[in-house]
Amino acid sequence: MDRKELFMNVRKAYRLAYEVQDSIVEIVEYIRTKINYEDCAGKQLFSGSVRKRKGVGEGYVTDNIGGGMWSWDYFPTYMYIYYFDGIPTETQNCCFSIVQVMDDGFKIAPIKYSSPSTKYFRDSADSESYLLFSFSIQKKDHRNIWFEYDGTEVIRDEGSEILRISDDIKNKGNEPYIKKNGDACFIVAKISLEAIGSKAEADQALQYFSKLVREETGYHLLIDETQEGSLLT
């Protein structure tokens, strides 16, 4: 492939990536209108954040170009978490998260490559793109951190834990991942991105997950739980 054809394909790839990400943002924003939450945040999980340098004018965001950054830092939503602090009960805190995994083919890259090249990835046809819906609830005296379902241990490598849980769900026929410890509970469901391209499909996935949360914890994730069964209008 000559360089002219290469960069023509790059332009096509950027435009296609935009269209896909735009549809995911629309789905996440739509879900946000349906759930009970107090605050929300986002975090890159595969790459590092590009932070603004102190004293630098608007538009100049980093001080480590060429030192400590890698190419994946410029693709923040390759693996990304949307985090929503839930409405606390009298005794418990909770959170709902949506994890976006655009391509899990990197997980077979050799560990020694901290910045894995795509040449080490699994073939794209054998890789997956999906969302994880997760919910955790625990006593108020425990830290409210994603994956910390029992409040006793912080899992520092969230990316690896996401892949482990995703594999566990896949190996068990797409059954949800549920961990309990006393009153604490952590629930994860996996939804293929191929199956959630519209608001109606997002409603179906959210209905399923909110029902699961209510059955396992008694918590009402939706703003109005009575909407269940009539969201697809």
Image: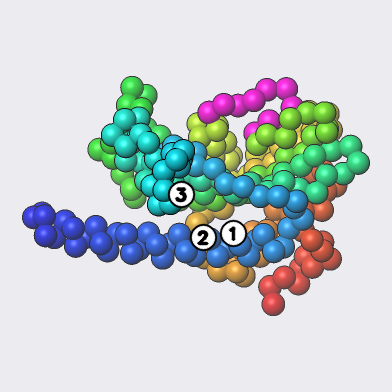
* Amino acid at the residue labelled 1: Val
Check whether the beta carbons of the residues at disc 3 and disc 2 lie within 8 A of each other.
yes
Q: Residues within 10 Å of mark 1 (few under 14, many from 20)?
A: some
Q: Nearer the viewer, residue 113 or 141?
A: 141
Which SS does the magenta portion mostly show?
loop
Find residue 136 and report its horizontal and vertical position in percent.
72, 40
**Cα distance between the residues tagged 1 and 3:** 13 Å
N-terminal-most mark, 3 or 2: 2
Find residue 22 and report its horizontal and vertical position in percent.
47, 64
**Cα distance between the residues tagged 3 and 2:** 10 Å
Q: Secondary structure at mark 3?
A: helix
Check whether the beta carbons of the residues at disc 1 and disc 2 lie within 8 A of each other.
yes
Q: Give the labeled residue for mark 2.
A: 24
Residue 202 badge: none
The total of numbered circles placed on residues is 3
The residue lying at 79 percent from left, 68 percent from top is 227
* Amino acid at the residue labelled 2: Ile
The stretch in magenta equals 147-157
Find residue 156 and report its horizontal and vertical position in percent.
57, 26
Horizontal relation, residue 62 to residue 41: left or right: left
Find residue 17 and report its horizontal and vertical position in percent.
37, 59
Q: Nearer the viewer, residue 145 or 54?
A: 54
The residue lying at 35 percent from left, 34 percent from top is 64
Q: Residues within 10 Å of mark 2 (few under 14, many from 20)?
A: some
